[in-house]
Amino acid sequence: MQSELLGISRGCLSYEPRPVSDDDLKLMRHTDKWHVGYLLGWNRMMEDNLCQEGFTAGQLQVTILMRTMGTET
């Protein structure tokens, strides 16, 4: 196998990252704007704020998106 000759795993050769969905991009923009405006990053508070704004996102999704954006809490 060619990957064995190169000393890398086969998984990294066939992995193609999925593009971020439009809904996630809207959520990320709103989360970033809210986080920067209030300098708060608690995921539970962020989740509550997003629900009040009409977004449907759970705490895990907010955590994953904040981690993707590099936002620290």
Image: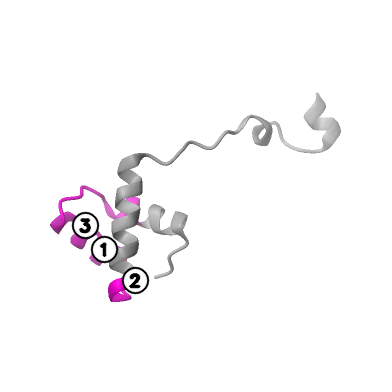
Residue 29 drawn at (x, y percent): 33, 56
Magenta residue check for 64 = no
Instruction: Give the alpha-carbon distance from disc 3 to disc 1, as whole Å.
Output: 6 Å
Q: Is residue 37 above or below residue 3?
A: below
What's the magenta region?
36-62
Q: Give the labeled residue for mark 2.
A: 36
Instruction: Give the alpha-carbon distance from disc 3 to disc 2, as whole Å.
Output: 14 Å
Q: Quadrant of residue 1?
A: top right
Amino acid type at mark 2: Val
Please tell me which residue is depicted at 46% across the width and 54% down the height of the picture. 68
SS at badge 1: helix
Amino acid type at mark 1: Met
Q: Give the labeled residue for mark 1.
A: 46
User: Residue placed farthest to the right in the image?
Assistant: 5
Q: Is residue 34 visible?
A: yes
Label 2 environment density (alpha carbons within 10 Å; few <14, some 14–19, many ≥20): few
Q: Is residue 41 visible?
A: no
Residue 42 drawn at (x, y percent): 31, 69
Label 1 environment density (alpha carbons within 10 Å; few <14, some 14–19, many ≥20): many
Q: Quadrant of residue 11?
A: top right
Please tell me which residue is depicted at 34% across the width and 41% down the height of the picture. 22
Magenta residue check for 59 = yes
Which part of the image, by quadrant, shows the C terminus? bottom left
